[in-house]
Image: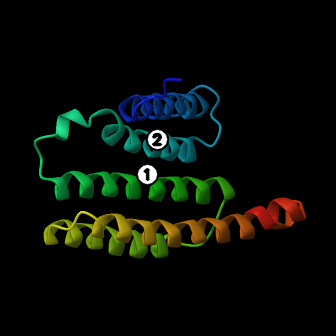
Amino acid sequence: MKFLDVPTLLQISAAFNLMAALAWLVLAKAFRIAPRASWLMVASHLARVPHLSCGACMMGWPAAVRLGLTELLLLASIVLLLLALRRMLGSRVRPRHIAWISGAGAAGIVAGMASGSAIAPQRINLLTVAVLAALAVREIWRGVGDRLSTGITVCT
């Protein structure tokens, strides 16, 4: 059995993100469903596309810069996703925690790139995204936790 190679899987993921961005765009423009949150979702999906679809474009770049840019785009995508989630849930908490955490994460990624390390930007991004995911769970819990079933709340 022949398996799909990594470049093909990356292209499929890029295509999926483009379709998801288009779906959110339709929700924002045609149906006027949470337009601001939908625009944030469009941006979140589009931030994932460059590093998925243009690996050959960056082949001549230093490895640390290539990996660091990928991590920065992933971080931007997660931040936009969290901001969209907050908007959909109608959170009244100011997004300063998101700004501080993502700013520190981006600074750490850039510092890792400057050190020439290939793994440091990935580790810093993993830690930053984990903290942002915990914030997302908190936002969901506060926003709709009382309306979710116990099983869904536990899975969240």
Q: Residue furthest front?
A: 1
What residue is rendered at 66% in x and 67% in y?
137
Q: In which quarter of the image is the N terminus?
A: top right
| 95 lies above or below 39 | below
> Residue 8: x, y in percent?
40, 28
In the picture provided, is 127 more to the left or to the right than 66? right
What residue is rendered at 25% in x and 58% in y?
68
Give the image quarter of residue 144: bottom right
What residue is rendered at 62% in x and 69% in y?
92
Q: Quadrant of the C terminus?
A: bottom right
> Residue 9: x, y in percent?
44, 33
| 68 lies above or below 29 | below
| 154 lies above or below 10 | below
Can you identify the residue that label 1 sits on? 77
Can you identify the residue that label 2 sits on? 45
In the picture provided, is 147 more to the left or to the right than 8? right
Callout 2–callout 1 Cβ contact below 8 Å: yes
In this orientation, which residue lies closer to the viewer: 132 or 7?
Answer: 7
Q: Which residue lies furthest to the right in this view?
A: 149
What residue is rendered at 56% in x and 47% in y?
37
Task: Tell me how far mark 2 sits from mark 1, CA to CA.
Answer: 7 Å
Q: Is mark 1 on a helix, strand or loop?
A: helix
Disc sitting over residue 38 in the figure: none
Give the image quarter of residue 106: bottom left
Residue type for callout 2:
His
Crowd tier of the residue under label 1, counting other residues whose Cα lies within 10 Å: few below 14, some 14–19, many 20 or above = many
Residue type for callout 1:
Ser
Of the numbered discs 2 and 1, the one sitting upstream in the chain is: 2
Q: Is mark 2 on a helix, strand or loop?
A: helix
In the picture provided, is 44 more to the left or to the right than 65? right
Crowd tier of the residue under label 2, counting other residues whose Cα lies within 10 Å: few below 14, some 14–19, many 20 or above = many
> Residue 28: x, y in percent?
57, 34
